[in-house]
Amino acid sequence: MGTPCIVGTEHATDLLKDGEVITVHATRGIVYEGKIEIQEAKKGVTEKAVSTADLVTATEIKVIMDLPDFAAKAAATGADGVGLVRLEIMIANGGIHPAEYIRQKREEDYVYMLKEGIRKIAKAFVHKPVWIRCSDMRSDEYRNLQGGEKEPHETDPMIGWHGIRRLLDERKILQAEFQAVKELHDEGFDTVGIMLPFVIRVDELRRAKEIMREVGIEPVKDIDFGVMIETPAACWIIEDLCKEGISFVSFGTNDLTQLTLGIDRNNERIAHLFSEMHPAVLGEIAKVIQVCKKYKVKTSICGQAGSKMEMAEFLVKQGIDSISANADVVDEIRQVVARAEKKLLLDAERKKF
Ligand code: PEP
Ligand code: MG
């Protein structure tokens, strides 16, 4: 949404009383007592960020776009498409858990709700790729939805029953999500692609492709069909995933870092150790890009790290095809990418002499 906020405060709900007025400087993570007046910055002191939409980069710059109502705002960045649409956010707004739609035999309502949301985004990004991620519902995160109380209690939901492993167990949910995308293709939104979350095995990809065929679309040929690279396992089997046939991969660095470093991303006590720039994570990314190039599979990133300058620079050097960032940093990332690409060209020129 482009609105900074503070999370993980631990005591805020105890300390703050109903009706108490506070001022939040969310960009810096500071909470002031009372109402702080904001002084108008003197002219020339703060300059408005310049749009870089005219800057052409070889690496495509896309946005992460979870909220259909913000599609127009995200499209105004001039992004080359949407690298990640998290269906969970649409689902949460709808108030009903996907498993509950199925239990109530309301698959059609689920398809309709998804289509409404995705269509809004696709309309704002006409002729540009919009990659939808199949739902990735962790069992602890959506208990407040209708039917959420029936979710299982898992020891560690982060590495539990979610992503493609769950969707293949609850096949009707996956079918409905593919059906929504198919119907949007029929309406003419044929740049809408699909990606599978939390893949660890080739047969997950194979089985998901079969389900896509059942709804009447040939994966890869008729639709961008990709997998998220979010587990070390996916990095190790990347060659086999490419051989099985995919249009693209997208690095989900939030999970990839969590699983590679063994750091629970929900645990703020160890959050300082969480770094996507850890050599182990970078090594995995570099290897996957290299293999994908061999198989002409497009590479992309949709984890939070794509919004970070040092990661963007690293990815350009590795030859990634596209980077997805939050809408509020698209300009910044585009500039970093342009500079990194220029540097690569200059270095290559210098080498010639
Ligand atoms: C990721 O893991 O990097 C990702 C984009 O998925 P999520 O943050 O929704 O787990
Ligand atoms: Mg993830």
Image (cartoon, rainbow, N blue to C red):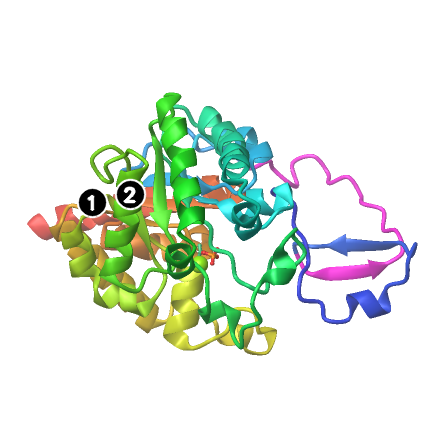
N-terminal of the two: label 2 or label 1? 2
User: In the rendering, at what x and y percent does residue 131 appear?
Assistant: 38, 40
Residue at the location (77% across, 71% down)? 11
Q: Quadrant of residue 271?
A: bottom right
Whether residue 299 is visible to the viewer of this picture, yes or no, is no
Q: Quadrant of the N terminus?
A: top right
> Magenta part of the protein: which range?
28-49
Residue at the location (68% across, 56% down)? 144
Residue at the location (31% across, 65% down)? 282
Contact? badges 2 and 1 (CB < 8 Å): no
The overriding secondary structure of the stretch rendered in magenta is loop
Q: Which residue is mark 1?
A: 345
Q: Amino acid at mark 2?
A: Phe
In the rendered image, residue 47 lying in the magenta stretch gets the answer: yes
In the rendered image, residue 74 lying in the magenta stretch gets the answer: no
- 286 left or right of 86 in image: left
Tell how many labels.
2
Q: Amino acid at mark 1?
A: Leu
Q: Residues within 10 Å of mark 1 (few under 14, many from 20)?
A: few
Label 1: state its secondary structure: helix
Q: Using the image as rendered, state which of residue 162 and residue 275 is in the foreground.
A: 162
Label 2: state its secondary structure: strand
